[in-house]
Image (cartoon, rainbow, N blue to C red):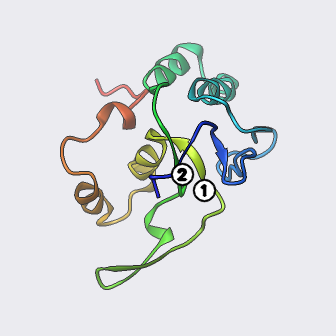
Amino acid sequence: MRSYTSTKLGSVTGGPYDNRFMDYPWQPEHAFPSISEYLEYYRGIFLEFCGAEYVDKLFSCFPTEELVHFTHGDLLPQNILVDGSKITAIIDWETAGYYPAFWEYCRMHDPGLMTPGWQQVLARLFPGPRREKDTSCGTDHS
């Protein structure tokens, strides 16, 4: 799936994301020509609700020079059907599109979306050190 790349960030049709995570008026109206513009769009939304210092810290963590990959967009346990240890289907493709490389990784590691055993699955999918910077942006661990 990640072998498909694009120069734009948006839906599989080339238009804006079908973003189920944010309602109107925060739905993007167009695809983004760069990761920088994608991040700046969402930065503006966050500034409506959070202080500038927090938003600047959060958005400074994300790389702006990465490949844009075709991504499911919501690849979490509830969307992966299994029979024993075999994946039989991946469902719920409405948010699929071309996202920055960090998107799926961050979404899959969201602490609020963890289910029993998911952390062990992620450890097998992503062996090696956890990309802490990608998943902890803007949080204070002191």
The residue under label 1 is which amino acid type? Ala
- 106 vs 66: above or below: below
Q: Position of residue 27 (x, y in %)?
A: 76, 42
- 76 vs 139: above or below: below
Q: Residue at x 50, y 69 (%)?
A: 79
Q: Position of residue 55 (x, y in %)?
A: 55, 21
Q: Nearer the viewer, residue 115 or 98?
A: 98
Judging from the image, what secondary structure is the residue with disc 1 in? loop
The residue under label 2 is which amino acid type? Phe
Residue at the disc numbered 2? 70
Image quarter for residue 32?
top right
Point out the tag, 2 or 1, that comes first from the N-terminus: 2
Which residue in the rendered view is the most extreme toward the bottom? Answer: 83
Label of residue 96 in the image: 1
Q: Residue at x 44, y 39 (%)?
A: 102
Q: Nearer the viewer, residue 109 or 111?
A: 109
